[in-house]
Image (cartoon, coloured by chain):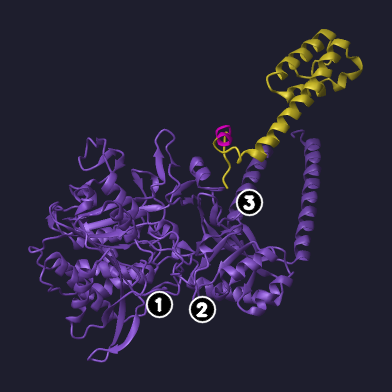
């Protein structure tokens, strides 16, 4: 009996050792890296982006950082399974497509320690043409675009962060000597979705791309007798690796300008304003002008059939959480001013009296807009040392912009008070932004000075004040501009974020990818960036405060109020759904369905987790030795067990 | 019923077992028919005709059912995605990817 107990205790000790050592073996075998995955998005007819196989793909690291290493890849035969490490200069559509059509690759890691030396855009040459105002246009706004983002890849790809990049560059350089142990990596980014959007939504493995747009006004309530000036921009950005979508010139710079305008106009006397000014930031615009189209559609066609019994400002059918937008009458729209890409204006060659360069910003007018252009031009000229001036575009068509969603309907309905649309950009025809829709459209992709940014804000806010009926005396707060500029373009860890947000950003890189709308119309997912912009807009347009000792936003009594350092702040700032009109939520199946495929259909696949892990790769002979010695060990232990069993049963008659 | 300690199976017991398994197999359980055949292998020299009849048709049934099931499985796996909503509706679990 005692022997039996000893035996059981022995077994338990051995087993627990095995389990414990297993996790430590895993720690010794693998090193996890911080990485940004290429994920999968489904379209109406197929899919774009990447997915690994279930369980991940692995291989030896092979660095491509020169033409020589690129050409040698085709004859490389040290191992069959290869993960290619790309220097960012060798990562583009042409090179990658040739590579994987000619020879098998198991995955790709993209280094970010060296920037591309040539202009590159993985977007289309005319971004989202089919959903804009000119679906048959022959213009090429984005000449560097090759449509890389809209391709589908049968292997995983990850971008590595800065420090990890140089580490991996070193390891894969060591691999070149052909000796063992070499370095390998396992890339796991298995995507649940497959086939196309319709299938994926039906199976519940995808959610529509979308988000929350934000609109804001200084008025506590929109006066419906006043004409409306809409000041807006597309909020979201894109990149091949969507976690790195800062899109500084694409949107973030204009966002800094708009938020600074709010800050400047905050202190202005608005009693003389005879117009309502509504500031709007549309989300998910890069996926077919989703936010603006949805808002326009709601202004014109929304009809609540049953109000929410708990909250009169929300509708339960069709579900919409905030009905304040009903105060805005479409026919009251008087003017539209849109800030698009502003960060890379061209120098005019003229200098100011104090010897600074003067930059050209470009007017893209539509439907008149002479009055708007005059006000902006005069504001710019009224400053002695203004470093900006305006030119009118040579093009007849508007560049891709959110205003198109409004113009489409205005053309159909003819708003009686409408005086025109003015889109302001840094380019006349082709984009000055050489990295449109690419990770490198970051803080380094800006080509103006701080004083030019201040001048822009000064001129824009003065013009808006004048247009609204004010006298045009506006003061720009340099400190605010500086803080918010670095916050939204370089590092999303500024004091504004810490004071307004209760959560801290997981990723310090500002990222305005719109992400997914949510699992149902009442269950939204908003990125921290979107929520931050909402809170900041609320803070800047506040019309009333109430010291209530609050902790959370929900402690304040209305939905459009926020809690900042124990004070409830009230503002006329609201979220608005940005989801394509193609989708409708089927309550009986509790899933999204496609109801109108003439609107954009983009749905993002779900996934559990994504990882990149490093490990050692041994030579074939080594590995065979491991296998053979393992087998010998197995046979030996089986033999020993048999012998012991026989011995014990003879000796003790126990087993 | 199937405990082999009863070494001396008489004919009646054998027929009983063979018939029971034969009937059970009809409930879409072709493996039971296979078991029916395998179970009687040790007694292959002492089977009477009635038992043999059950075993023969158990084997045929097993092969027939298996062919149908496997054929259907092949058709289902190949066409699952092509059938769209119908394909998903007849699936108990839908694999990712």
Residue A489 as seen in the image, left or right of residue A30? left
Relative image position of residue A248 (x, y in whole percent): 37, 70
Camera-side residue of A203 and A338: A338
| Image height of A36 relative to A306, above or below | below
Q: Residue at x 46, y 52 (%)?
A: A602
Q: Chain of mark 2?
A: A
The vertical placement of A616 against A48, above or below, is below
| Chain that the image shows in yellow | B
Q: Nearer the viewer, mark 3 or mark 2?
A: 2
Q: CA distance from mark 1 to mark 3?
A: 51 Å
- Mark 3 or mark 2: which comes first in sequence? 3
The residue singled out by tag 3 in the image is A18
**Over which residues does the magenta segment extend?**
B86-91
| The C terminus of chain A, quarter of image | top right
Q: Relative to the observer, which residue lies in front, B11 or A208?
A: A208
Q: What hue represents chain A? A: purple
Give the foreground label among 2 and 1.
2
Both labels 3 and 2 in a single chain: yes
> What's the CA distance linking mark 3 and mark 2?
53 Å
Residue at numbered disc 1: A444
> Which disc, if any, is residue A118?
2
Measured from the top left, where is residue A177 in percent x and y?
70, 77
Judging from the image, what secondary structure is the residue with disc 2 in?
loop
């Amino acid at each position: 009996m005692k022997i039996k107990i000893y035996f059981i205790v022995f077994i338990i000790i051995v087993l627990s050792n095995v389990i414990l050592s297993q996790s430590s073996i895993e720690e010794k075998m693998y090193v996890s890296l911080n990485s940004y995955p290429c994920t999968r998005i489904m379209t109406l007819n197929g899919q774009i982006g990447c997915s690994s196989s279930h369980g991940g793909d692995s291989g030896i690291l092979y660095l491509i950082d020169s033409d020589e290493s690129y050409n040698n890849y085709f004859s490389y035969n040290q191992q069959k399974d290869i993960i290619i490490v790309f220097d960012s200069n060798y990562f583009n559509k042409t090179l990658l497509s040739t590579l994987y059509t000619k020879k098998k690759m198991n995955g790709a890691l993209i280094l970010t320690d060296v920037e591309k030396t040539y202009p590159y855009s993985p977007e289309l040459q005319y971004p989202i043409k089919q959903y804009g105002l000119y679906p048959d246009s022959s213009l090429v706004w984005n000449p560097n675009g090759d449509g890389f983002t809209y391709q589908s890849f049968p292997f995983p790809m990850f971008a590595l962060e800065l420090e990890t990049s140089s580490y991996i560059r070193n390891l894969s350089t060591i691999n070149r000597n052909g000796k063992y142990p070499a370095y390998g990596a396992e890339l796991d980014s298995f995507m649940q979705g497959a086939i196309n959007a319709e299938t994926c939504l039906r199976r519940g493995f995808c959610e529509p791309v979308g988000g929350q747009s934000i609109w804001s006004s200084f008025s506590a309530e929109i006066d419906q007798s006043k004409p409306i000036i809409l000041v807006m921009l597309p909020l979201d950005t894109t990149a091949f690796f969507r976690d790195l979508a800062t899109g500084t010139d694409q949107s973030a710079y204009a966002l800094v300008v708009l938020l600074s305008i709010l800050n400047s106009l905050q202190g202005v006397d608005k009693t003389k304003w005879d117009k309502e000014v509504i500031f709007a930031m549309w989300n998910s615009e890069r996926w077919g002008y989703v936010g603006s189209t949805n808002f326009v559609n709601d202004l014109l066609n929304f009809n609540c059939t049953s109000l929410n019994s708990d909250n009169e400002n929300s509708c339960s059918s069709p579900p919409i959480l905030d009905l304040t937008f009903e105060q805005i009458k479409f026919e009251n729209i008087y003017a539209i001013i849109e800030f698009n890409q502003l960060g890379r204006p061209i120098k005019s060659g003229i200098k100011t009296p104090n010897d600074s360069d003067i930059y050209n910003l470009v007017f893209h007018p539509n439907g008149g807009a002479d009055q708007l252009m005059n006000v902006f031009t005069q504001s710019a000229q009224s400053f002695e040392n203004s470093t900006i001036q305006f030119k009118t575009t040579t093009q007849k068509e508007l560049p891709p912009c959110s205003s198109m969603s409004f113009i489409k309907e205005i053309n159909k309905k003819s708003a009686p008070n409408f005086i025109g649309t003015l889109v302001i950009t840094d380019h006349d025809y082709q984009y000055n932004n050489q990295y449109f829709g690419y990770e490198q459209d970051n803080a380094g992709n800006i080509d103006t000075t701080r004083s030019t940014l201040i001048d822009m804000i000064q001129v824009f806010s003065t013009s808006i004040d004048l247009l609204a009926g004010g006298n045009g005396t506006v003061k720009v707060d340099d400190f605010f501009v500086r803080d918010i500029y670095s916050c939204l373009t370089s590092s999303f860890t500024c004091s504004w974020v810490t004071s307004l947000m209760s959560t801290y950003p997981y990723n310090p890189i500002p990222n305005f990818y719109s992400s997914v709308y949510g699992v149902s119309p009442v269950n939204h997912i908003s990125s921290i960036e979107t929520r931050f912009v909402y809170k900041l807009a609320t803070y800047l347009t506040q019309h009333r405060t109430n010291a209530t000792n609050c902790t959370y936003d929900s402690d304040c009594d209305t939905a459009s109020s926020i809690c900042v350092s124990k004070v409830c702040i009230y503002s006329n700032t609201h979220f608005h759904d940005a989801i394509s009109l193609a989708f409708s939520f089927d309550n009986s199946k509790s899933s999204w369905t496609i109801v109108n495929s003439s609107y954009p259909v983009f749905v993002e696949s779900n996934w559990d987790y994504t990882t990149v892990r490093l490990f050692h790769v041994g030579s074939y002979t080594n590995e065979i030795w491991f296998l053979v010695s393992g087998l010998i060990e197995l046979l030996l232990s089986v033999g020993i067990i048999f012998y012991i069993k026989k011995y014990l049963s003879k000796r003790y008659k126990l087993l | 019923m199937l405990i082999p300690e009863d070494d001396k199976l008489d004919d009646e017991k054998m027929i009983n077992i063979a018939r029971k398994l034969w009937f059970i197999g009809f409930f879409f359980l072709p493996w039971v028919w296979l078991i029916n055949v395998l179970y009687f292998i040790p007694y292959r020299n002492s089977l009477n005709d009635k038992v043999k009849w059950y075993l023969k048709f158990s084997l045929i049934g097993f092969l027939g059912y298996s062919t149908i099931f496997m054929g259907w499985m092949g058709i289902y796996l190949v066409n699952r995605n092509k059938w769209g909503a119908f394909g998903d509706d007849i699936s108990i679990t839908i694999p990712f990817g």
